[in-house]
Structures are given as structure tokens and as C-alpha cells.
Image: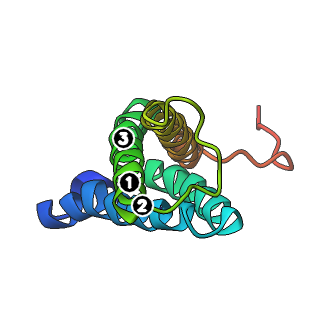
């Protein structure tokens, strides 16, 4: 498991929670006007990133909090970069593109929660005493 987010220095926390999703969203926003395939590939990487970010948290709730913020930052910078680029979107964002921020926030929260739940389950398993089925209790 990766180190817990809370154990990282504050500057690293800032980079992980704000800068990384902002840069990733910016790249995705630019690629939205270049290639549908590249845009969707980055979305797939974003799904993995959301889950793995959640692994840095001890509970599903903590992972969800991180994912909610990361998803909001990602979606906001994606739309901002796309608007600044001025390119026509290669993927249909629907009638209300701003809803994408809501979607990325919710998806980020769910992915972060999955990661946090996975870490919590792993830590619970490692704390349980191991039982060997070949050993029989002595009377």
C-alpha cells in the first residue's frame, strides 16, 4: 500500500490534491479538442488515478473526500482548458457542459471511496491472526 496521505509533507499534499488533478484536467481539456480517442484514454487513466489516490486513505469516507475534491478540480480545469483552446470538442459534452464538473466530482468520490475501502479491508486482514487449518487444538 502507498503511504498514508496524512503522513506526507504539506507541500506534497497540496501538489497531490490540487496540482496533479489540475494539470491532468488541463491536458484532458486540450485533448478534448484534438482527439476523442486520446480524451477517452486519459479518462481511463483518471479512473485509475482516482482509485489509487483513494488507497492513500485509511477509510472509504476519507478516500471519498479526496476524490470529490480531485474530481471537481479535474473537471473544472478540463472545461477551462477546453474553453481557452477554442477547439471544437471531439466528444459531445451535452447541452450543459458544466454538468461535467458534477459528474467528475461524483465519480472521483466513488473511486476514492473504493480505494479507501480497499485499503481498510487490506489492513483489517493483516491485523487478524493467521489460522492454519492443519493445526488441531490440543485438549
Residue 72 can be seen, yes or no: yes
Of the two numbered discs 1 and 3 in the rendering, the one whose residue sits closer to the viewer: 1
In the figure, residue 61 lies in which quadrant? top left
Image quadrant in which you'd find residue 81: bottom left
In the picture provided, is 15 more to the left or to the right than 98?
left
26 vs 129, left or right, is left
Earlier sequence position, callout 2 versus callout 3:
3
**Circle on res. 55:** none
Q: Where is residue 84 in the image (x, y as percent from the top left)?
A: 33, 60
Distance between mark 2 and mark 3 Cα atoms: 22 Å
Where in the figure is residue 51, as x and y percent of width and height? Answer: 54, 50
Q: Which residue is drawn at the image coordinates 49% and 40% (left, top)?
A: 104
Image mark count: 3
Q: In which quarter of the image is residue 16?
A: bottom left
SS of the residue at dot 2? Answer: loop
Q: Residue at horizontal 56%, vertical 30%?
A: 95
Q: Dot 3 surroundings within 10 Å: few (below 14), some, or many (20 or more)?
A: many
Q: Residue 86 carries which label?
A: 2
| Vertical order, 78 against 65 (above or below) | below
Image: 17 above or below 2? above
- Locate the C terminus and report the quarter of the image it occupies: top right
Tell me the residue at 42%/61% (across/down). Answer: 86
Whole-number angstrom distance, CA of label 1 to CA of label 3: 17 Å
Residue 72 disc label? 3
The answer, for residue 58, to whether it is visible in the render is: no
Dots 2 and 3: beta carbons under 8 Å?
no
Looking at this view, is 102 or 127 the one in front? 102
Q: Is mark 1 on a helix, strand or loop?
A: helix
Q: Do the residues labelled 2 and 1 touch (CB within 8 Å)?
A: yes
Cα distance between the residues tagged 2 and 1:
5 Å
Q: How crowded is mark 2: few (under 14 residues within 10 Å), some or many (20 or more)?
A: few
Residue holding disc 1 = 83
Amino acid at each position: 500500500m502507498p503511504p498514508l496521505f496524512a503522513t506526507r509533507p504539506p507541500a506534497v499534499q497540496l501538489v497531490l490534491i490540487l496540482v496533479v488533478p489540475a494539470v491532468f484536467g488541463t491536458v484532458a481539456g486540450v485533448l478534448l479538442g484534438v482527439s476523442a480517442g486520446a480524451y477517452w484514454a486519459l479518462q481511463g487513466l483518471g479512473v485509475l488515478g482516482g482509485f489509487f489516490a483513494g488507497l492513500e486513505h485509511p477509510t472509504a469516507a476519507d478516500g471519498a473526500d479526496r476524490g470529490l475534491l480531485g474530481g471537481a478540480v479535474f473537471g473544472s480545469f478540463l472545461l477551462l482548458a477546453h474553453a481557452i483552446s477554442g477547439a471544437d470538442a471531439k466528444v459531445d459534452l451535452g447541452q450543459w457542459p458544466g454538468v461535467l464538473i458534477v459528474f467528475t466530482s461524483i465519480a472521483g468520490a466513488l473511486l476514492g471511496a473504493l480505494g479507501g475501502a480497499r485499503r481498510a479491508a487490506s489492513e483489517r486482514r493483516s491485523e487478524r491472526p493467521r489460522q492454519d487449518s492443519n493445526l488441531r487444538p490440543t485438549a
